[in-house]
Amino acid sequence: MICVIVRAVPDLVEGLEIEEREVKPYRYMANELDEYAVEHAVNLKEKYGERVEVVGIANEDAYDEIDEFLYMAIAKGADKAYKVLIPRTTNYKIVDAMSEFLKKFDIIMTGTLAVDEFYGVFGAIVADKLNYPYVGGVKGIDLDGDFAIVKKELGGGAYLVLKVKKPAVFGILSLEKPPRYVPFSKLRSIMKTAEIEELRFDIEEESLDVRFIEPPKPEVEFIDGTPEEIAEKLADIIKGLVT
Amino acid sequence: MILVYAETFEGKISDITYELLRKARELGDEVWTVVIGKAELEGLGASDKVIHVDDERFNNPALHRYVLKKIVEMYKPKKILIGNTPIGIDLALGILPTLVSCVDLDSKARAVSYGGKVFVEVEFEGIYLINRGSFEPLKVDGEFEVERLSIDVEHEIELLDVVKPEIDVDITKADVVVGVGRGAQNIIDVAEELAEALGGVVGASRPLVDQGILPASRQIGRSGRTISPKLYLALGISGAMEHVEGVKAKNVIAINKDKKAPIFRISRYGVVGDVEEIVPLLLERLR
């Protein structure tokens, strides 16, 4: 049975409010690499009939928004969706509380990283907590009896092919083919019929002594004007730089 | 003691190891370097001691995290410096506090997060996954003490194959690179023509490679290749840290709709605007 962890993360396109002790997003979205993990899991379901359960984790602000991402996972083919409300804490404390639940799965997948994940790598923490092998940077996954065969990216298109004994944890980085398309009508009907089960864990709070800083203003020279004027100025600059 | 993980692949120590050694040396504590698998111990003279787990079973980098875990349990280093690379990130041990995308380290550590839009400052002891290019390399050919260590690991991860792509175009050697990102996916043909007009090549950020629009050989960044052209023209690229790490260009010109896009932080000239509108006009003038 496969478990996919999907995290609600700040939508970076919508911008962020940066305070010294807190980063406040205007909107949340599903972590893109976690959505890739859903794709891989559903591929394995289609190929081998594996059961796929998705666990959404979100803080108070994103706890309603995560429903949509979980319905999307069901629309893609996941068998069951749970959601977990997390307090202000770290990945380490979340995994401490959830590890017993995660023991029933023989493959646990999530994104290699989330966009706001800077302290502890979720998948690696799960693996060490359960004493399972961990491989991150995964772009492909197949099954062979007691083993998973994974492709781990090395960069520049190179990759390792690894045979990993299950149970195991994988951090997903990319897809080998484009993600499934889910028509809105299908998503809407799933939203009416599917249920998301709330899971409650005793997750300890942990506040990190961290300071968030807005990056310094860039020293870039911005070129203004109409599109034609901009193109004209840019062309002159480029000619000066490349000849 | 500060422990530096020497990343190796196919018997060779990766360059990022020397960048880590520079910082480790500055921290003022004893510096040990750990090399896992068969490798030529080259340029590690900045270390007080090298621990070499000289065992061909560990030519498989996927096993390094278990070897490192044992070494950490044995020697209890205060700080562990690891390159934030496709191999290095898997060494983030779940048993220790770990900072991802670290760019500086003294009494406090600094990292970039939120796609490059926020800097994070935090004080702790544990693992620092350090971004490429954060420190000048320190490669020293002198003498150093080597301790050979034999270690067993219990996890079964077998390396079946190493697959390398065919390189259609070598973007690392081009003088001009026109980079296309998500914002430029509708004008790839225009970008190709522009690159041709400038005697350059087209490179891409990760999303376009993931979507199969361009081959992996064109990918710029942490999980792609590092480019060092005279001019990098970044079209519709937000400039997340993963991408920017692979850009060592003399001049960067970026066009992006979002004035706050991190790509402008490494740019000499910037345009806040629509690439679909501006790039065709630019091409007309450079053809």
Image (cartoon, coloured by chain):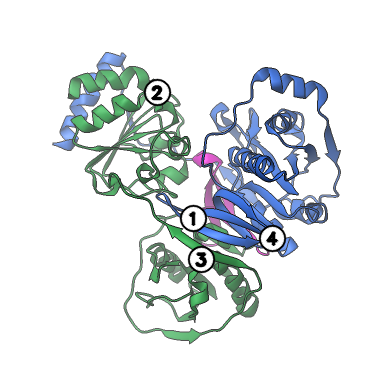
Chain colours: A blue, B green
Of badges 4 and 1, nearer the viewer stands: 4
In which quadrant is the C terminus of chain B drawn?
Answer: top left
Kindly identify the residue that appears in the image at 69 percent across and 42 percent down.
A45
- Cβ–Cβ under 8 Å for marks 3 and 1: no
Q: Which residue is mark 1?
A: B86
Image location of residue A185, percent across then percent down: 69, 17
Residue A196 visible in this rendered orientation of the protein: yes
> Residue A235: which quarter of the image?
top left
Q: Residues within 10 Å of mark 1 (few under 14, many from 20)?
A: many
Image location of residue A42, percent across then percent down: 67, 39
**Cα–Cα gap, marks 3 and 1:** 10 Å
**Cα–Cα gap, marks 4 and 1:** 26 Å
Q: Is residue B102 magenta?
A: yes
**Cα–Cα gap, marks 2 and 3:** 38 Å
The answer to which of A45 and B51 lies nearer the viewer is: A45
In which quadrant is the N terminus of chain B drawn?
Answer: bottom right
Q: Which residues are magenta?
A: B95-123
| Amino acid type, callout 2 | Asn
Of badges 2 and 4, nearer the viewer stands: 4
In this rendering, do the residues under marks 3 and 1 share a single chain?
Answer: yes
The answer to which of B277 and B108 lies nearer the viewer is: B277
Q: Which residue is mark 3?
A: B61
Name the element at disc 4.
Answer: loop
| Amino acid type, callout 3 | Pro
The answer to which of B47 and B246 lies nearer the viewer is: B246
Q: Which residue is mark 2?
A: B186
Q: Which numbered disc, 1 or 2, marks the residue that appears first in the sequence? A: 1
Q: Which residue is mark 4?
A: A146
Name the element at disc 1.
Answer: loop
- Cβ–Cβ under 8 Å for marks 2 and 3: no
| Amino acid type, callout 4 | Asp
Left of A117 or right of it: where is B261? left
